[in-house]
Image: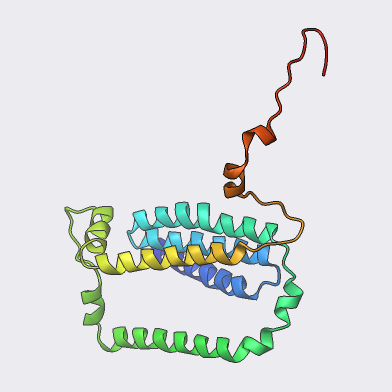
Amino acid sequence: MIIQGLAFYLFSLVAVVSAVMVISARNPVHSVLFLILTFFNAAGLFVLSGAEFLAMILVIVYVGAVAVMFLFVVMMLDINFAELRQGFLRYLPIGGLVGFILLAELLVILGGWTLAPEAAATAAAPVQASVSNTHALGQILYTRYLYLFQVAGMILLIAMVGAIVLTLRRRQGVRRQSISEQVARDPKACIEIRKIPTGRGI
C-alpha cells in the first residue's frame, strides 16, 4: 500500500511538471518530448487505477503514433517561431479568458465531488468481478455513451479534413501531381516507339 502511494505521487508529480514544461519550453521539439513523458506518467496512473487497457492504448496510440507524428511534423516544418511569439501579447487576453473558463469548470467539478460524494459514485462504471476491464469499458462506451462517441469521431474527422485543407496550399516552385492532367494526356504525344537494330545504340 505504501509502494502504491509513493508510485502515485511520483507519477502525478512528474506528469504535472512535464505538462507545465510542454507549454513553457522554448523549443517545440522539447515540448513534444515533455508531452510524451506526460503520456507515460498518465499511463502509469491508469495502471495504478486498475485500467490496464487504457494504459496500453495511451502508450500505443498517443505515444507511439500521435506524439511521434507531432515530433516529426515539428522537426520538418520550417516555421519562424520568433515571428509567432511576437503576437503573444495580442492574443493574451483571449487566451487568459479561455484559461479562466477552463479553471472555473475544473473547480466546479472538484467542488461538486467534494460537496456531493455520491456524484462520483453515479459517474463511475459499476464494478463487476466477472467482467474484465476491457469488457466493462466497451459495454459502457457503446451503450450509454454511444452517440457521444460517434459525435467525437465526427469532430475528429472534421478536424483532420480541416488540417489537410489548411496545409494544402499552392507554392511557387513546388511540383505537384495533377491526376486529371495525367489522365487527359494523349499516349501518342507522350510515348515514342523506336525500333533499334540489334547490336547498335540509339
> Is residue 149 or residue 168 the one in the foreground?
168
Residue at image coords 30%, 83%:
113
Quarter location, residue 76: bottom right
Residue at image coords 26%, 77%:
120
Query: Which of the colour schemes (rainbow, by chain, secondary structure, one colour) is used?
Result: rainbow
Question: What percent of the width, then of the height, locates residue 91?
Answer: 62, 87
18 relative to 174, above or below:
below
Q: Specify the farthest residue to the top.
A: 199
* Left or right, 124 with reference to 106: left
* Left or right, 140 with reference to 179: left
Quadrant (top left/top right/bottom left/bottom right) for the N terminus? bottom left
Q: Specify the farthest residue to the right.
A: 201
Question: What percent of the width, then of the height, locates residue 102?
Answer: 45, 84
Residue at image coords 27%, 59%:
137
* Left or right, 26 with reference to 167: right
Question: What percent of the width, then of the height, locates residue 142?
Answer: 24, 61
> Is residue 83 or residue 201 the one in the foreground?
201
> Is residue 3 or residue 166 the one in the foreground?
166
Quadrant (top left/top right/bottom left/bottom right) for the C terminus? top right
* Left or right, 1 with reference to 62: left
Quarter location, residue 135: bottom left
92 relative to 199, above or below:
below
Question: What percent of the width, then of the height, locates residue 89?
Answer: 68, 88
Quarter location, residue 18: bottom right
